[in-house]
Amino acid sequence: GGSAVRACLQERGLTEFTADKLGHGYKEIMFPVQGDGSPPLESHGLHIWPRGQHFLMALANLDGSFTGTIYMAREGEDSFARLSTEEAVRAFFQEHYADAVPILGGMEAIVQQMLQNPVGTLGTIRTKRWQAHGKVVLVGDSAHAIVPFFGQGMNCGFEDVSVFSALLTELAPPGQLSPAATATVFQRFEEARKPNADAIADMALENCTEMMSKTADQSFLLRKKAENVLENTFAAKFRSRYAMVCYGGAGNVTYRAAQVLGEQQAKILGDLCAGLGDVDQLDMTQAAALIDERLVPLQRELGVDLSTVKVV
């Protein structure tokens, strides 16, 4: 499966690519609206049940229901392969997700969906070269398919189209299209987009681990609370990696910039939260100093304007 054009380019020695499948797959399972027509969960939020080696998540739909997804290993203990009978499904959900059973519509609904719904595939495509001789260019998933844990796969493809269109307008406007101009557009497109595609691929994989296990870790949750405090206090100098990824783009807040800044911010949060018992103990003077010392110069180096990160 996958891109026939990408495969053809590789066969002719014009590119190389890797297709790395996760050992985990997923199944969708619905959270229906309640008997009185109300949503089963708070609609303005992402809901996660982290369990270490697997997790359940729920995202709101417009009709008040939620689309649930359970992510787990394809094979081995606590895997989809083991959940092949009604008895196995019942025992698994009773052990790991008993609190979610009522809002999933009850055990019968769970069993039916878990036995009937297909297992989806999760994987990452990384392509070494996206274009060849001004003749062909890869865009979107054909060049950089990613796992869904940052919710950015489609948006990354849309960004490809936006950048490609801008380059065409700049370098090969109507009436001035030529083989040389096309080759330049393709090359500049790859140079602009590949670092960002690689960055969001990495961050999406990191988010898988975060959602599966770290969201149940108290030290991680403390750092997230501290991150929220810093973001609300120093909005012009500090925005969470999530905000930069999901609401950036303008002000040169690219995926790659968000990745680089996020790595430095994680170190700052680690220093601030070391030995901390509660977020109220956060040393804001130290926080301001660390941000000015480590983060602001990096933002200048990257040409980033965080004021453009607007949560909508």
Image (cartoon, helix red, strand yellow):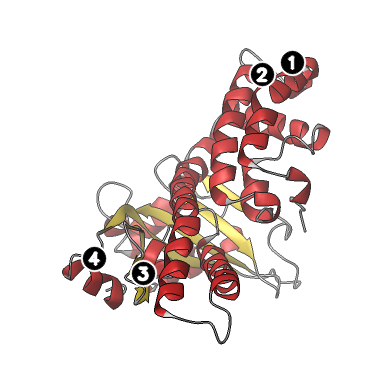
Label 4: state its secondary structure: loop
Q: Does the CB distance between marks 3 and 1 fall below 8 Å? A: no
In terms of sequence position, does the residue under pointer 1 or pointer 2 come before the other?
2
Residue 251 horizontal/vertical position (percent): 70, 51
**Cβ–Cβ under 8 Å for marks 1 and 2:** yes
Determine the secondary structure under disc 3.
helix
Residue lying at the far right in this picture: please name it: 233
Dot placed on the residue nearer the N-terminal end, 3 or 1: 3
Residue shown at the point (66%, 29%) measured from the top left: 297
Give the amino acid type for the residue marked by disc 3 in the picture.
Leu
Residue underneath mark 2: 272
* Circle 4: residue type: Leu
At horizontal 29% and vertical 63% (from top left) the residue drawn is 84
At x 17%, y 70%, the residue is 12
Q: To which residue does mark 1 refer?
A: 286
Towards the viewer: 201 or 137: 137
Mark drawn on residue 115:
3
Cα gap from disc 3 to disc 1, whole angstroms: 54 Å
